[in-house]
Amino acid sequence: MSDDVQTSKGMGATIAVVVLGLAIGGGLGWWQAEETADAEALEAEVATALRTIDPLERRTALLDALSKMRPETLPALRAGFESEFRFADSCSVPLFAATWADFDPTSAFDAAIRDWDNIAKRGQMTTEIAYELGRSGRVDRAKHLISKLTTARVRFPAWGGLVAGMLQNSDLVGATDILVDQPDTGDRNRIVESIIMHFIRTQDLEGAMAWVDSIPADAPRKVKKSTFRLAARYIASLEPQAAVEWVEAQPEDADYARIADVVVAEEWIEQDAPAAMDWLLNRTTPGDRVLAIRTTMKRFVERSPTEASDWLEKQEPLGDLEIGIRAIVRELREDQPAKALSWSERIEDPKDREKMIAFVAGQWMASDPEAAKAWVESKELPEATREKIEAERLEAAEGARKW
């Protein structure tokens, strides 16, 4: 082969390489330009979606944008979200977190902790990520990430999200294990609430009661007691009779169930207060009676002073129920002072009775002297009591004393 021919072929090869290089380089340049343009478009799309006023349109637009999330598009989508984070509400934050957690939960979790100053939104992010991990069976990863959280207001809902995801994955046993092993009281309560709400959403109250019953009475950190109490409250708010039957079915020596009487009655009062009080008086043991009556009567009176007063009138003797008189007097003393004084006269202890009468009558004397004076004159009150009424009147007139 001649030198001219070799030179010609060499030049041809060089030209081919150059042309191929230009083609590849041009192609790369075009791809990079397109990627940059796409990134800018995605960033703008997310930002526009967040600024949409109508909630339904905002959700739809954001879902459309987030459907394009890939590892390579994440920076652009994240930039659009962060640029308009002030518009991110309780709907858009979980959507963004769930989409990100679907392919990279660790970076999503770390970003939630690092980038969000707003505790509420940080909690929404971490909770949704924990939920996605629980739903997909990556529980150990979620537990590791949650262990990084030091703020209770963020950590509590994150545990709840994880457990909710596990229950979505039908992992009740695993969720229960997390509950029993949890050392923090607040975290335990949030886990219990998540599990109970799962049963409530599926309208399976019997399942909820059966689950609580399955927890050993000697479980560490009094898990059974706190779980039984929370569950009883939730169930009583929905079906009081079911809660009553459940509580009554517990062994008499079940320490974990003793306080449940009170929480069931407190919820039952909202629906049928007289029935709740009657049941409570028959159920409560002597050691719990004062606490039970104080808490439930207070709720009864606050809900309906007239109904509570009418019910208490029928109770003879009052006995431990006398503690409800103070709550009734507190509610009636301003609008119905004469009736409040009538109740005050029923207090058995002489010192407490005199103190209450002096206070109510003194307050009444300051607001309506003629009516109050007529009441005082109709009573054969000791001089010492009259002096205390006058002292209360002076203090009330000066605005120096508050109930």
Image (tube, rainbow, N blue to C red):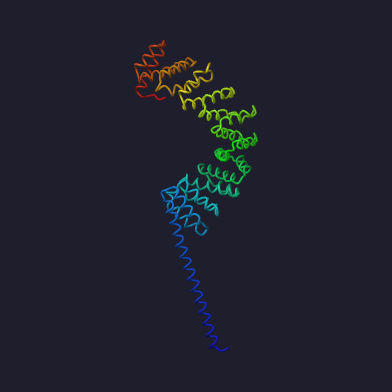
Q: Is residue 370 above or below residue 107?
A: above
Instruction: Quadrant for the C terminus, please.
Output: top left
What count of labels does the image hold? 0
**Residue 200: % across, % down:** 56, 38
Q: Is residue 157 above or below residue 107?
A: above
Is 202 in front, or is 374?
Answer: 202
**Residue 223: % across, % down:** 60, 36
Instruction: Quadrant for the N terminus, please.
Output: bottom right
Seen as rendered, the residue at the extreme top is: 380
Is residue 192 in view from this perspective?
no
Picture quadrant of residue 250: top right
Is 307 in front, or is 161?
Answer: 307
* 249 on left or right of 117: right
Is 378 in front, or is 198?
Answer: 198
Picture quadrant of residue 161: top right
**Residue 368: % across, % down:** 35, 19
Q: Is residue 273 above or below residue 137?
A: above
Is 48 in front, or is 15?
Answer: 48
Residue appearing at x 48%, y 23% in the figure: 308
**Residue 261: % across, % down:** 57, 28
Is residue 300 in view from this perspective?
yes
